[in-house]
Amino acid sequence: MSATAAAQKVFSDRIHRIEVSATMAVTAEAAKLRAQGVNLVDFGAGEPHFATPRHIKDAAIAAIEANFTRYTAVSGIPELRAAIVERHAADFGSKYSPEEVVFTTGGKLALFHAVQVLVDHGDEVVLPAPFWVSFKDIIQYAGGKPVILQTSEAENFRVTAQAIEAAITPRTKAIILNTPSNPSGAVVSAADLEQIVRLAHARGIFLLLDECYAYLQYTGASISGGSFTDCKEHLVVLGSLSKTYAMTGWRAGYALGPKAVIAAMSKLQSQDTSSTASIVQKASIAALTGSQQCVADMRQDYLSLRDEVIAGLRKIPGITCTVPEGAFYVYPNVKAYLGKGGVKSGMELAGKLLHEAHVVTVPGEAFGTNEHIRLSYAVSHADVAEGTRRMREFFAKLG
């Protein structure tokens, strides 16, 4: 019996429905090279280059000193749930109660729990592409069927209400929408977002709205599906403090939604992680209730970095790139170089960039397209300049 066949017999069917996270795989490969002393410019995993703000760190330290280190309520301490509700209401005009929020170990877990409690075997989930690497696998792990909705690069990967409606079938249970988008940085317009929220509500379909980058929009005021308070019954807002407050390693996420859905997610959480880390909860309160100037400052720097990386990519003949309207990613089209130098795919191109140019990127195959690579520009200005210089030299040799 082959090793593959043996593994199939040992492990559950559901574990074979998913792949290792592409961004984490890239991070691991880059770590190996870094351990060998290779100097890398890392545009790989999206992670703020800023330090967590001082007042947030101080709140965690104070919690430790006060021995606030025990289990808490599964869904989060009352002060934290109130802080989440109040922050979201102040910024987006939503109307949630503390009973309609659960605090989770990162935004990814909030998404995982929401899909697990809502999606059953055979249920369809509409998923616009390009999509964040984990969406498709999380749907498949639950036994659901991702219905991939391709968007047009010529239209900046715009997701429209009309396209969403056309993808809906009698088996559609949910829609996953990520705005601003990872990997493209595309933002769903306010008009389309309202139409999608209302469409889902009218059809009795759950809209899982990933707002991980809601505070990193560059085209006007940030918007949220939670603003449409009369449609709450079929809306689950998935949030994260990771990118907003440079708290990726703290693993701080949450979900806002109907009481019944939040109760089901909390029940599931009670059986996997129990509560989240107590000191992270105290730090998160400080983040949500303290000055938001740090958020504005970081957003302004990301905007400058975006413009710099776009300018650098435009100096590479043959590469085209939409201008991101939010988040901190660019998603250049590298089709002009596929087939050159023995490179047949974005996956192979990303590998050669890593090992030959020492630039870390993520191949577009991870996000549902075949002609792109993703770069995170949440790095220093010096890294943007050096990384795009290395890429320019690499592509000159390849082409």
Image (cartoon, rainbow, N blue to C red):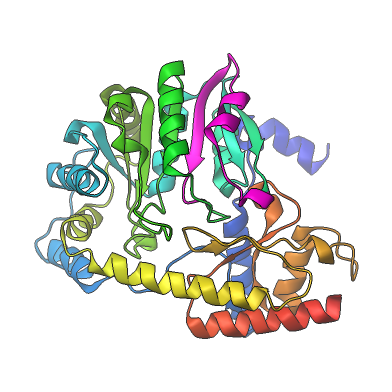
Figure quadrant of residue 209: top left
Looking at the rendered structure, the number of numbered marks drawn on it comes to: 0
The residue sitting at the top extreme is 170
Instruction: Work out whether residue 320 can be spotted.
Output: yes
Query: Percent position (x, y) of residue 345?
Result: 81, 58
Above or below — where is 36 with respect to 339?
below
Residue found at x 84% / y 81%: 397
Instruction: Work out whether residue 141 can be spotted.
Output: no
Give the position of the C terminus as an image quadrant.
Answer: bottom right
Q: Is residue 398 magenta?
A: no
Q: Find the magenta span and give its range.
A: 153-181
Give the position of the N terminus as an image quadrant.
Answer: top right
Of residues 27 and 204, which is closer to you in this image?
204
Above or below — where is 244 with respect to 308?
above
Query: Percent position (x, y) of residue 205?
Result: 46, 21
Residue found at x 37% / y 29%: 235
